[in-house]
Image (cartoon, rainbow, N blue to C red):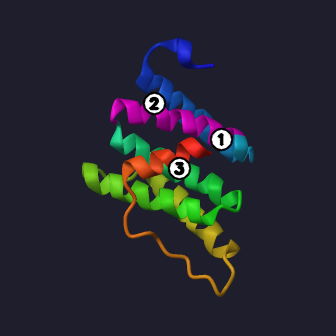
Amino acid sequence: MFRGIGDRRCTSSTYKNTGMIASAQGDHAASTALLREAVRLRFELGDVAGLSECFVHLAVNLAVQHRPDDAIVLLTAARERRAECGTEPSADEIAAADRAMAIIRRSAPSQRQVGAPPSVSVDEAVDLVRSL
C-alpha cells in the first residue's frame, strides 16, 4: 500500500507508525504484518536504531500472541542493536519493552524461568521477523 510513496525511510516510518496504531487497537496480526515490512526496509537501509524500535514493538505483539520465546529474542536483539549503534531507546521504546516483559512474565508458567538468549545477531532477528 505505501510502496508507491517513494522515500523508503518515510515509508518504513509509516509502516512502523501504522503498525503501532494497529497494536494499540488490539489488531496484533495486522500490526505484525506492518512492522515486518518496516523491518524489511530498515534492514535494507542499514537503520540499526530503527530496527531496534521495530523489534521492541514486534515483541509486544508476539508476547500478546503467546510467543514469549520469540518476543524475548527480539527484545534481546533490540537491546544489542542499541548498544551496537550507541543510541538510547526512546521513552516509548522503553515502555513497549517493559510492556512486553510484563506480558511474558504473566503468561510464563511459574516453573519456567524467563531468560534472554546470550546474544542475537541482526540477521537472526531479521530471519525471525521474516518468518512471522
Callout in the foreground (3, 1)? 3
Residue of label 3: 128
Which tag, 3 or 1, sits closer to the chain's start? 1
Neighbor class of circle 1 (other Cα within 10 Å; few <14, some 14-19, many 20+) is many
Number of on-image labels: 3
Residue of label 2: 41
Asked whether disc 3 touches disc 1, contact meaning CB atoms under 8 Å apart, the reply is no
Front in this rendered view, residue 106 or 71: 71
Give, as a single range, the part of the protein colored magenta.
30-46
Residue drawn where x is 46% and y is 13% of the image: 6
Q: CA distance from mark 2 to mark 1?
A: 16 Å
Q: CA distance from mark 3 to mark 1?
A: 16 Å
Q: Is residue 96 above or below residue 18?
A: below
Callout in the foreground (2, 1)? 2
Q: Which mark is residue 107?
A: none
Q: Given the image, on which type of amino acid does mark 2 rest?
A: Leu
Callout in the foreground (2, 3)? 3
Residue drawn where x is 34% and y is 52% of the image: 81
Report if residue 16 lies within the magenta region. no
Residue drawn where x is 54% and y is 56% of the image: 96
